[in-house]
Structure formats: C-alpha cells, structure tokens
Amino acid sequence: MSSTTTESMSPREPGSSPARPGSSNAGRSLAGPGPTFIRVLNSEVIKFRSLLSTLILLASTAVVMVGFGALSAWGTGQFADAANRDPQAAARVAAQGGDLTVSVPTSGIAFAQLILGSLGVLLMSSEFTTGMARSTFAAVPRRLPAFAAKLVVVMVTSFVVTAVSTWVAGLVAVPILDNYGLKLDLGSSQSVKLLLVNSIYVAAVAAIGMALGTLIRNSAGGIMSLVGIFFVAPIAFQLIPGDFFKEARKYLPGNTVEPLTAAQHIPDTLEAWQAGLVLGAWVVIPVLLAAVLLKRRDV
Amino acid sequence: MIEVNGLTKVYGAKTAVAGVSFAVRAGQVTGFLGPNGAGKSTTMRMIMGLDRPTSGSATVNGLPYVQHKAPLRVVGALLDAKAVHTSRSAYNHLLAMAATHSIPKTRVHEVIEMTGLDAVARKKAGGFSLGMGQRLGIAAALLGDPQTLILDEPVNGLDPEGVVWVRNLVRYLAGQGRTVFLSSHLMSEMAQTADHLIVIGRGRVIADAPIRDIITGNGQARVRVRTDQPERLQQLLAGRGASIDVPEREMLEVTGLEPKTIAATALENQVMVYELTPLVASLEEAYMELTKDDVEYHSLPAAEVSK
C-alpha cells in the first residue's frame, strides 16, 4: 500500500559484510523445505478430508444425485406410459426429439450445484470465521498458493463427485427405465456430453462459491449471495418486464448449461460457444477479484 | 532477531500502532508488555505479514516475514489460541500445517508430546479449553523448529502448572540462543520470565530496556526499618535527607538512603534496629507508573461503580 514498506526489502543489518550482500540473511531461510505449490496442495487436501462436514456434504451430493436420477427415471417411465395411451402426450414426446431419457442421470444437478457451491463458500469462509486463516497464511505468507491450492481441491472434488454420482444415477436409472420399455445408453455421445458439461458446470459453481467465501468471509452471506445468483436472479429477471432483463437473463451463469448441452440451438438462449465464454467469465472474474483482495487485505 | 522500524497501523480514524520501532535480540526472552488495546497483537500480526502496515517495516533476520523461503522454519508464532478450524482435530491441524513445509509426521508427534496434548490430539480443537488451545498454538509454533518465536499472550488461560511450563520452555528456548518475543498484560508474569522489556501503551513504545533497569529506574530504592525508637531514628534520618513514611508503630519506610547508611546512623546514635530490609519496587508498580497516562480503558474505582 505505502511505498515505505518496500524499504524493508533491502537487508539493513548493520554488521553484514559487503562481500556477501544480504546472502547471510537469505541463507537462514533456506534451513529446510518451504511451501511449494505441491506441498500447499497436499496441506489443503489434508485440511479438506479432515473435516467431517465436508465429507457429509460430498455424500449428500451423491445421495441426492442418485435419488433424483431414480425418481426421474420412474417419472419419465410413467409419462411415457401415459403418452402411449394419449395421442396428445405422444405428440409432445415426439416434439422433444424423442430423447426423453438422456437427461435422467443429471436431473438432480440443481441440488448438486447448491450443495457443492455452498461447500466452496464454506471452505474459505470458515477459514476466517474460525481464525484458521491466521495459521494458513502464516504458513503460506504469499497467500495466493494457498488460495490456488484450495481452488484446485474444490473444483476437482466437485467435478469428480458430480461425474461419479451422475454415472451411478445413470446405472440406477437404466433398469427402472427398462421396466417401461425405455432405453438409456450411458455411452452415447449425448450422455457423455451431459455428464461432462454438468460436472464442469458444478465445478465452476464451486469456484464461484469459493470466490464469494473469500470476498465476503462470512458463511451465511456467501451462501446467500450464491443462492441469489443461481436461484433468485433467474426468477427475478423473468418477472421483471422489459427486453433488457429478458436479454440479461441469458447471461446468468445458471442459464449457460442448457445451450452447452442442447443437441440443437434453443431459441432465446446463447450459442454454445457464447455460453462457454459467459460461464468462464463468471468463474474468472470473481476468482481474480477474490485473489487480488485476499492478497491485499489483512487476515 | 526481529527489527521493527516506524511501524504504524491506522484503522479508519483509530491509530492502533503509532510509529513503533524496536529490536528483539536473540538469546534472551523479550517481553512485550502493555495494557489491553495497546497495540501488542497488531504489532505482532504485522511482523507475521498478516496485517499490512500503514507505514513502516518489520523484518525477521533481515527479511520481511513474507519473503522468507521457509517461513515456518524461521518464525514460529502463537498469535491467537483460536487460529484453528474448530471441527478439525489437533493432530490433523498440525499435520496440515506441517505439510506446507514437508515437516515429517515424527515432528508432529514430537510437538504433541512436548506440549502434553497426547490425550486430546485426536479430538476436535473446537472443544478445547483455552489452556489446551494455547498448548496447541505453541505446538504449531514449534513445528518448524524455528530460530525465532513470537508468542502473543501464551499463558492466557493456562493453569499454574501450564504457566510454569511456558516459563521454563521460553527460558530454555532463549538459552539455546533463540529469539523469543512474548507479549503479556500480566506484569508479574513478565517479571519472572523476561530479560528485556518493551512496554507499549496507546500504540507507542514507552520503555525499551532490560527488566532490571525498568524496575529500579522508576521509584528510588526504599528500605524498611523496625526500631523501638521510631521518632528518634526518623529525626536522625530526616536530617540526612531521607523521606520517611511511618506505616506502623515502630516501623519506618525510608526512601533515598542506602541500608548501610541507615545502619551506620543507627549505630552511631545507639538506636536499636531489629529489621532492615531493602524493598525492591515490583515490576507491577513500575509498570503502573509507566503506563498510567497511556491506558486505553480506565476503570472507575469500585466505590464509584456501585453508586
């Protein structure tokens, strides 16, 4: 902040000999290994897996994803049964391109996004609410390696948990759908695309959550902001009349998944490449802002 | 070696630390003494790179803390007994801290044993008493076997056994040639632990001197004298320029004369003296004297509170 702090960068030990300028000081810090990124990552992994609350949130995500997959398979089967008897419903099914079942495994994604997004918030906000941040940033005083390591842990875990639960949800859904004579091919390109895009999306939400947790430093405030962006804003934008909000709604992060996974372009949504860029911006901007402020603010 | 130069921290309209400069040397325990809100913790957090100074600088072994390659191996700090995630076990907390510097698990077990945490190491740190939290904080500070230790109020909440343990530990660490910087608002604790004292009040350094100088520097030496002829002796001593209190019958408190002079005066005049005790001003008195103008939060006398 102030220019006077840079003074301290030059060693000013009166007794240091001019032959080895500053080297005697620097040498003392080389007493042993320091915090490299890999070590900090290892530390963040230990912190992550040693919290029961984290593991509970991960398990709930899996349960919700698989549960909703099963429910959705059952509902889709019932709907298809009705459609067979009702020509109107049959016409509606046909209008959807006939591929009813492919989105069954990801039907719980809204909840996965909420749980893992909150996890992202909590992992950082709890550092500040518990005082752990002082230990973390005393060990890694440059701060950004710890931030980056935590981000990697949050995003990778969210991606893997979402992908695995989506896949298991699919495995559970296949026999249920089979009962109604419906087919779900988990290996089809559309199934794989849905699984990957949704998992990346949830990882992105978790990253946004972590950025909010870093900026707000308060668990309730961070989670409320996350809910505001992903659940309240889409509804509010729909209710407010006017073209601006209709247009703006497309750019909300929650509305980027549809264009990214659709087989064909859906009217009133972004193109797939635009949606990818918008989602990327929703991650990069808050994360960079959080990183800059984390580096500058007092812990 | 910790060097602090013109360190200032301003929060909005409030100046917590106002241009503080001092050096903490190796091989001795340096106490950092001051009333609540004097700026002790803020100064320590700035040394540790957690708070950004408004101006000024702080270095450890010639480098700002942030620039050290292996900071935990250079400085160990206990800044707050609650700098722990409440839901994580003490063992996992230390393990995660150690992982950042590739400190082996054996060292984690070592510091747990050293601080007497064996029995509770696998329990959630949130359930710890203040004393246990202090021990965990000290364990974390010792992890990297650092040459410099910064301990903010380490005896806060410790039982008497723990207080003695911390006292012996810091004396032992300083004896090994390490730099130990210890804050407290308990003067009695400092009197028994520190070699050198930096007294701070309202964000300013009030005194920076060896502890002996601080005790003797304020208030002159006093001598307690018991005699069966107090009036006579009082007269004689007053004649030699002493100022004398008479707290009890047959007892004088003499300020401004050496015990030997008092004894000689009594002997010459055939006055019997049956006690002659030099009174050392307590650090507490010296401290109150030093900080009376710099206390942030004054209390009312008990009588006024109850009105």
Image (spheres, rainbow, N blue to C red):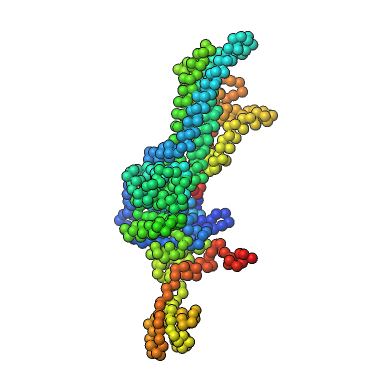
Q: Residue at x 41, y 88 (%)?
A: B271
Q: Look at the image and tell me in which quarter the N terminus of chain B lies.
A: bottom left
> Residue A2, how many percent across, how many down?
50, 53
Residue A274 location, quadrant: top right
Indicate whether B48 appears above or below B278. above
Front one among B185 and B119 = B119
> Residue B85, how many percent across, how many down?
46, 44
Residue A75 visible in the displayed image: yes
Residue A287 visible in the displayed image: no
Indicate whether A100 appears above or below A55. above
Q: Residue at x 54, y 67 (%)?
A: B293
> Residue B39, how many percent across, how many down?
50, 58
Indicate whether B307 appears above or below B73. below
Extreme right residue here? Answer: A241
> Residue B45, how many percent across, how many down?
46, 53
Say whether residue B42 is left or right of residue B114: right
Extreme left residue here? Answer: A19
Say whether residue A79 is left or right of residue B223: right
Q: Look at the image and tell me in which quarter the C terminus of chain B lies.
A: bottom right
Q: Residue at x 45, y 48 (%)?
A: B128
Q: Residue at x 50, y 29 (%)?
A: A61
